[in-house]
Amino acid sequence: MNSSFGIRNILQFILFVALQILLMDNLVLFSTGFCFIYIAFLLFLPIDMNRVWLLFLGFLTGFTVDMFYDTMGIHAAASVLLAFLRPHVLNLLTPRDGYDASDSVNIRVMGWRWFLAYCFTLTLFHHAAVFFLETINFQTALYTLGKILASTLFTTTVMVILQLLFFSPKRERIDYR
Amino acid sequence: MRNLFAFIYRFRAFLIFVLLEILCVYLIVRYNTYQGAAFFNSANNYVGQVLEYQSGVTDYFRLTSVNNSLAHENAELRKELMRYRTQQLSDSTNLLDSTFYATTDTSRTAPYILHAGRVINNSVRRMNNYLTLSVGAADGVRPGMGVISPDGVVGRVKTVSRDYATVTSVLHSQMLVSAKIKSSDTFGTIKWTGGDYRRAMLDYIPLHVNPAEGDTVVTSGFNTVFPEGILVGTITSVEKEQDKSFYTIEVQLAVDFAQLSYVYVVENTRKEERENLELEAGIIIDEQ
């Protein structure tokens, strides 16, 4: 099974969080498009990951980012929400004959449509949680909605680029044998 | 009883989800209270080290502008020093008998001490923006102190660790700065409403005064955080709305928060004395 949480996932955690803190923190498009690439770590975890594990990983990831962003609790809350919704979204998107053991969250294994639907939905929920928790009030709801949409598109695009660059379809198969 | 455990086990994912979210909301609420000290923030030693390393790299790209601003500040200070020197040369009261004023007069000594600090983390585009400085409790920085830059008011220290401090920037939805219009001495409150990081609002200016575009806004000195007369910004628009008893005034902030590199933490040596006195007199100090 490739569902084990291995050294590869730990490396991904460090890489994605570092990318978020060191680079993406300074990269804001037109002061509306934010990129929270660290959630890619949660999205790219093995498909049949234990739900409880996933929730704690979500909390840990969000909490780490919160410490650097001085937004105590906001990213943690959004990431826990994402971790909770992930198995449900995966269920909704199940291919006709279920997931294979060799399936992983990979754009070349699962196809463009599956990947985009999966990433876009979960990113949208996460970003909506982050931006509404940040403002609390609904006075500037329109501006916040704009921010959510622009940021979701931005984050999803970056995730697709990272997938195309660094995730080869072959590696999973070799792992599996 | 067994049924209960079976129930809990069956919904364990949902229950843990709810528990974690409650924990998060608790963290958000606790951290949002103005002076709430928290350990897990960017003043934390490990986090501070990572941020300092990062700014150690990125600062090289800004050396020219940092040098420029420091040289500019030096020039300003020299100009002021020169003025004092010429004043001293032309003024001979000091040479007179000490009957005019006692040389130990404490009103002549400035009660403020400045601690210089490097900005190692900064944001301007969120709803609640914070800065992290590489000075901490070891350098004499305490929570609640004001932070200024050569250009004007920056914010207020929120938490400190041994070597680092987090600062609530003026660009924070709950940060209020007591300010006054310099020409008329009318005081109001500076509040940032989000969006553009160069603009803020000046509230509570009553309708009987006549503020004009271009008027300077400075700190009022009514609380112990900032000294009086530190620049906040200039008025860019004044509007009188029908159903309001105060003006709607927009202020262009003097500090460019995106370009901050070195700031000063203001320590008021008489803070305790003044606050104790005000407390004894029954005045509630508002957190501005």
Image (cartoon, coloured by chain):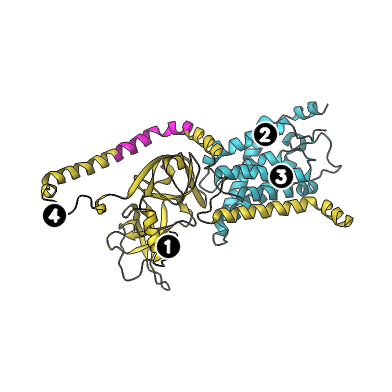
Chain colours: A cyan, B yellow
Q: Amino acid at mark 2?
A: Gln
Q: Residues within 10 Å of mark 3 (few under 14, many from 20)?
A: some
Q: Circle 4 sits on which residue?
A: B99
User: Helix, strand or loop at disc 1?
Assistant: loop
Q: Nearer the viewer, residue A154 or B43?
A: B43
Q: Amino acid at mark 1?
A: Ile
Q: Residue at x 59, y 36 (%)?
A: A19
Q: Amino acid at mark 4?
A: Thr
Disc marking residue A56: 3
Counting residues from the start of the chain, the first of labels 1 and 4 encountered is: 4
Q: Are marks 1 and 3 in contact (CB under 8 Å)?
A: no
Q: Quadrant of residue A158?
A: top right
Q: Is residue A121 visible?
A: no
Q: Residue B45 location in percent, x, y? A: 54, 38
User: Helix, strand or loop at disc 4?
Assistant: loop
Q: Residues within 10 Å of mark 2 (few under 14, many from 20)?
A: some
Residue at mark 1 to residue at mark 2: CA–CA distance: 49 Å
Dominant SS type (magenta): helix
Is residue B160 shown in magenta?
A: no
Residue at mark 3 to residue at mark 4: CA–CA distance: 74 Å
Is A22 located above or below residue B176 in the figure? above
The disc numbered 4 marks a residue on which chain?
A: B
Indicate left or right for A87 with A61 as reference.
Answer: right
Query: Which of label 3 and label 2 is nearer to you?
Result: 3
